[in-house]
Image (cartoon, rainbow, N blue to C red):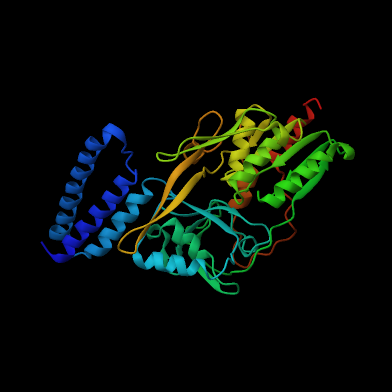
Amino acid sequence: MSKGFKRAILAISVLLVVVVFLGGFGLSGVRAGTQNDGAYRQMGVYEEVLHKIQSDYVVEPSIGNVTTGALHGLLESLDSDSSYLTPAEYTSYKAHSAEGTAQVGLNVSKRVGYATVVSIMPGSPAEREQIQDGDIIESIGGQSTREMSLAMIRLLLAGKPGTDVTFSLVRLNRGKSEPDKITLTRTAIAVPAMGEQEYENSSILYLKPVVLNKERVTEIETRLRSMQKSGNKKVLLDLRDVTEGDETQAVRLANAFLQSGTIASLEGQKMPKETFSAEPAKFVTSAPLVVLVNHGTAGPGELVAAAILDDKRGDVVGDRTFGEGTVQKTIELPDGAALILSVAKYESPSGKKIQDEAVMPNVVVGPSIDQYLAASAEPEAGAQTAQKPEPQTDDQLNKALDILKQKNA
């Protein structure tokens, strides 16, 4: 057995033992012995697979690369947020994190093996490039995102202000099969102002927070407290494409609409269940409420929508959300590598894990066929547009307004 092969076996064995003793396989109490036996048997399977690869593969493989790929796959098989970082990646991860927080405006996760755009920050370089939710980042800097952990993908998209990042983008619903090569300049992106509008003779107050940080939730609470002075009697909260923010502030925002009941819970194998309940002192308004969501609603936005829906406080209109709701822990390994491991998941009041099941609106409204065809249309080279396209109707917004109109103030 070669030294490289032995090192590969040792690397996988060490990682398995670390994950086992940290609770990654659900070991606890009297079951620990039985499950440890099962883990050790799996090590034998890994050893046999690696041995066959080394002896029978078409060319002599790099066992180090095979091992790294196996470890990446092991962590990503748990969930999209869990990652394995090699010693080199972890060193880069720590160094890169200190360089700055300039962004291009892409909120990404990992689906179907590749980096997937969850939402776009308004006013960002990504929005100006007309990147859309659901587009797939095939590679960054020439390296396939299929071979990267989510932590490294997010890290490579960020960096020093004024620097460029180049990536290949597969634009979905645009009638193109070949990826576009995109170069964007990282910049310090200001948080957009909250969108605010009034409908139905000012009786309906429309709020679009964009992010759910402390300042924005305070702004929403202030506006809700003063709404009656403006003649507003009902609230339309637009959480479409809301991914950024703080789960603590999401709980606070839900509490502004809920006088009692469960807002969410958080639980992990080694983390005792924590239940977040509505506090009467933080309750702001009982005004009729509709919440808008879409597939770009993730994380904090999903917590609010799930609470409103499960507690029957209002209607949730739109399409299925993205599904993002975990707490991560970084665990350094002896060889300089690291695990970024999900150690707890948020649950809705009904007990559904948001990471696994997302939030399904009680009133489902997807993009209209006209919107789909408009997005799919790709103009021919050199074609001239005779006139500006008419603005598309927002079916989700219109449905939400129709529902609110029927509610008694």
Q: Is 241 situated left or right of 339 in this image?
A: right
Quadrant in which the C terminus is drawn: top right
Q: Where 376 falls versus 277 (above or below)?
A: below
Q: Is residue 71 left or right of residue 275?
A: left
Q: Identify the residue shown where x is 43% and y is 49%.
A: 80
Q: Which residue lies furthest to the left in this view?
A: 1
Q: Is residue 98 left or right of 86 when viewed as pictured?
A: right
Query: Which residue is pictured at 41% across the width and 57% down the height?
Result: 149
Front one among 276 and 180: 276
Residue 218 position within the rendered picture, expressed as x and y whole percent measured from the top left: 73, 47
Tell me if residue 39 can be seen.
yes
Please indicate whether residue 40 sits to the left or right of residue 139 in the image. Answer: left
* Residue 281 percent across, percent down from the top left: 72, 34
Residue 159 screen position, x and y as percent: 54, 69
362 in relation to 225, above or below: above
Horizontal and vertical percent position of residue 343: 43, 45
